[in-house]
Amino acid sequence: MDAPLASLERKVEQIIALCETLRAENRRLRERIGALEEEQSRLVERMTTARTRLEGLIDKLPAE
């Protein structure tokens, strides 16, 4: 009778450990997503600035 109970206890402990591992991984992934979204925002801003500057330079070119 103790063997099935001990087996069940081990399985429950394994599930708990897996849940904790997945929670930690989920937290790391959410942080990574946040960092990547910030980086994307900065890159979009840089692209917009570069586009604006290029359009200004193109407008200054003499017409052919």
Image (spheres, helix red, strand yellow):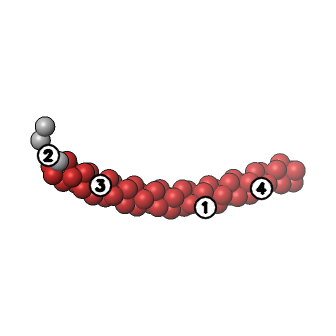
The disc labelled 3 sits on which kind of residue?
A: Ala
Give the left or right position of residue 2, taking residue 17 as reference.
Answer: right
Q: Which residue is mark 4?
A: 9
Please give the residue where the numbered disc 3 appears in the rendered image: 50
Quadrant position of residue 50: bottom left
Q: Of marks 3 and 1, which one's residue comes earlier in the chain?
A: 1
Dot 1 crowding, Cα within 10 Å, few <14, some 14–19, many 20+ = few
Q: Nearer the viewer, mark 1 or mark 4?
A: 1
Taking the image as shown, residue 14 lies to the left or right of residue 52, namely right
Q: Under tag 2, what secondary structure?
A: loop
Instruction: Depth check: give the residue in front, 9 or 29.
Output: 29
Along the viewing direction, whichever of 50 and 41 lies nearer the viewer: 50
Residue identifier under label 2: 62
Distance CA(mark 4)–CA(mark 2): 81 Å
Q: Position of residue 23 (x, y in %)?
A: 59, 59
Disc 3 vs disc 2: Cβ atoms closer than 8 Å?
no
